[in-house]
Image (tube, rainbow, N blue to C red):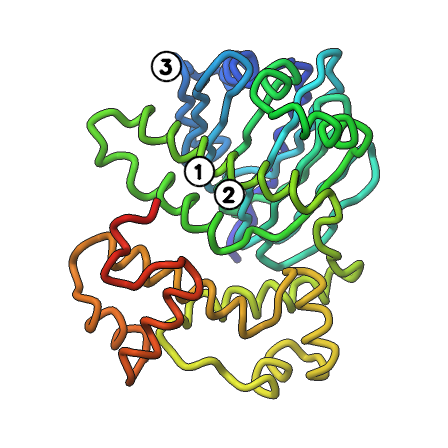
Amino acid sequence: MPVKKKKVLKKYISEDEDLRTWIKNFSRELKTPSGGNVIHYPESFAKGYAKVVEIQDGLTFRMVDYKLNADFSYERQPAKDFHLIIYFYVYQNCERLGMYLNKKPIIETENCDFSGLMLTHSRTTQSLFTSRGTTVRGLTIQVSEEWLKKNLVESEKITLSLIKQQDLFQSIIRPKYRRLLGELFLQHNYSAVPDLYLSTRVMHLLDLFLEEVMHNGLKGTTLPKSAREMQSLLYIEEYLIHHYQDQFPSIDTLSKMALMSPTKLKQSFKSAFGTSLFNFFQKNRMHQAKSMLQANIHSVTEVGKLLGYQNLSNFSTAFKKEFGVLPKDAAELT
């Protein structure tokens, strides 16, 4: 009879004001060198790394990419100084996953994948539990109040005061964010100046996010209270993202996959993602097309065919509707 491995729980409580201090203290906790701004995790804890880069005074980011070899419990204590903290995180193969803000659950779920965007601030208590075997890939952006006051236009400083009064803004990682996150994790090793490559993309991501928050306010999206329903929506999201080369499936097909009625699925998906199922599918499809065209490997005709378009004119129309330019001009887009 095989011997069952004893579960190991790694606990860490952080009282660090900023990410640069966090990486030094966490590397000390793990008894592994930080190498300046990078930790390569010891096998007893996880396989992977964490990296912290300061872009400007008051603007820092952390990237993590690892697979846990132990259960992990993490708590971030409230800080005296105010910082906005933006999390873009993807968790896969989670036996258990729990996120808490000020001791109240944001999500508690089992045996599922989870991805999401969260905006909070440094004066909250933030807790996380993830189980052994979970794969974690994420970006944390930390922005000081001084940096925001210096860089925001005068008319948006009222919105900043409103943000300070709200502990949590939660949303879905939309296709435009997913594309930039993909570039961060998959391509930076090919750059001659990797930290500059990363920093420019993080700045772009921050610009997109702050512009969206400043223009649309802090309503965000309405996520299901049921973990089972959230899991179903995330399953549909992943399906639509990865099947961009296929035709859009029928609502009946998707509702059977989600174990929901067609009406329930359409309503829940739009509340959570801020758009319809088809619009989500189409937007992701066009962002895939943009990446393929900018890679300069395939012609416009080839990309259209790879995305399942029989009529190139329809592809050009859809691309222009999303980006304002024809596919042949994709190189001009940022």
Image position, residue 245 (x, y; %): 35, 74
Q: In the figure, 185 relative to 251: above or below?
A: above
Residue linked to disc 2: 136
Q: In the drawing, what numbered circle is on residue 65?
A: 1
Which residue is found at the position 43% from the left and 44% from the top? 181
**First of labels 1, 2 by sequence position:** 1
Give the camera-side residue of 93 and 258.
258
Question: Which residue type carries mark 3?
Answer: Gly
Question: Which residue type carries mark 2?
Answer: Val
Which residue is found at the position 64% from the left and 76% from the top? 258
Q: In the figure, 3 relative to 19: above or below?
A: below
Residue linked to disc 3: 35
Give the camera-side residue of 86 and 301.
301
Judge left or right: residue 228 versus residue 176. right
For the residue labelled by badge 1, is the local secondary structure a helix, a strand or a loop?
strand
Image position, residue 113 (x, y; %): 57, 56
- What is the quadrant of residue 142 in the picture? top right
